[in-house]
Image: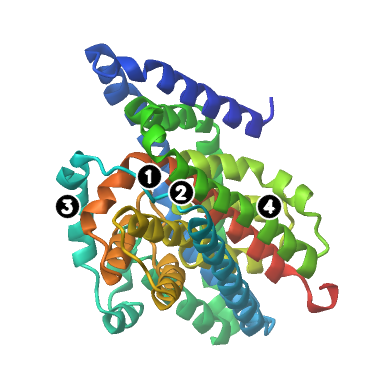
Amino acid sequence: MKNHHRLLLSLLLGACAGLVLHPYAQSEILQATNRYLMEPVGQLFLRLIFMIVVPMVMSGLMLGVYQLSNHHGLARVAQRTLFFTVLASSASVVIGITLVNLFQPGVGLDIPQSASDSSAVAKIGQNAAQAKPVVQSLLEIIPKNPFATATQALEGEMLALMFFSLAFGVALSVSAAGNASRWIELLEETYAACLLVVDTAMKFAPWAVFALVFQSTFKFGHQILFSLGFYVLIVVAGLLLQQSLIYTLLLRLFTRIKPLTFFRQCREVYLYAFATASSNATLPRSLELAEQELKLKPEVSRFVLTIGSTANQNGTALFEGITVLFLAQVYGVDLTLAQQVQVVLMSILAGIGTAGVPGGSLPLIMILTQQVGIPAEGMGLILGVDRLLDMCRTTLNVSGDLVIAALVDQPDDER
């Protein structure tokens, strides 16, 4: 059985097992099984991947920048990456806003009383309150201590780590060839070692996927979907439109790649992204796929995918736009056209700053809701379905990274 078939089977079996056992979730035996078997299995796999994300990001980005700089291609790749990122993110948010205004999933929805009492909402509020002013956030992209930044990369400091890696890669490209070559050999060996860890971890992936999906379905079941089913349907529909329409159109317009063939080659990474709900955890596998399966130039894929794992969050931007307008409808907050445009722009910018970990977009959504006068307690409405939607939007985020890498990889004369 091919690996992506094993992953799909594990995902389906985990979902079915969780749904079947959810009615018995109060059973001490099942709770112990979930706590002492399923959770450790899933977390063990994620930790194996997370532990090499930082060295892989640093070595991959430094190598990519070094090679692009030597061939005078860095400016072109950076410009094309920024152009396609803004284009795809803008399209995703417009799709989301259009669907919400057209179908109005929040109109007439009863608000559960428990929503305002959720401790999880208070925690999200604390995280949102800790958000720094824009000027301060821009300044902190330049790290004072890159080693300290590396230790906090998975907790929101990834952009600063990327800036250091970019700067160091450029410095290597202009230094003396003899001195730089030793660094490049070290970076190449580090990157190869990271790929070896990824290959080893992927042998364990089917068991981990089963455990991760089981935890979500066992905890929440399907009951929550009855009250928020229309909202979930709108989000999923928006994600599917972005994937099937926008990404297909971009590949057809700017490359000679057949979209269906491209998506088929990426299916294993899609399943992996869906199960982990983490762009950072999926990044090592995406880098490997881009070079070995999609045959993209390593210097391009390493640059675009590494930057994209934090800066290109199409699915997150779409989800944030839909959620803000959905909550506005629930609470009867009538947003003007100017306010909706503000939501669009802020969703695009917020998508760039979202942490690539499960639930990383929730504090930013609370900030958006506060900007347009929506009660913060409304966050409690979506917490029950956030894990499922997080898995869906992460899949689109990862797909968008791979699509943009393919777009940037194309020579100008092949467009």
Instruction: Find disc 1 in the rendering and name its residue.
Output: 386
Disc 2 residue type (three-letter): Ala
Q: Which residue is mark 2?
A: 281
Query: Badge 3: few (under 14), some or many (20 or more) residues near its Cα, within 10 Å?
Result: some
Q: CA distance from mark 2 to mark 1?
A: 18 Å
Q: Are marks 1 and 3 in contact (CB under 8 Å)?
A: no
Q: CA distance from mark 4 to mark 2?
A: 24 Å
Which image quarter: residue 280?
Answer: bottom left
Q: Nearer the viewer, residue 9 or 203?
A: 9
Asked if labels 4 and 1 touch by Cβ distance under 8 angstroms, the answer is no
Alpha carbon distance from label 1 to label 4: 23 Å
Q: Secondary structure at mark 2?
A: helix
Using the numbered discs, state the Cα–Cα distance from disc 4 to disc 3 in whole angstroms.
Answer: 37 Å
Tag in front: 4 or 2: 4
> Of label 4 and label 3, which has the lower sequence position?
3
Whole-number angstrom distance, CA of label 2 to CA of label 3: 27 Å
Left or right of residue 389: residue 25: left
Decide if residue 193 is in sight here: no
> Residue drawn at (53%, 46%), measured in percent from left and top?
236
Q: Is residue 403 above or below residue 63?
A: above
Q: Position of residue 49 (x, y in %)?
A: 44, 45
Which amino acid type corresponds to the residue marked 3 in the rendered image?
Answer: Ala
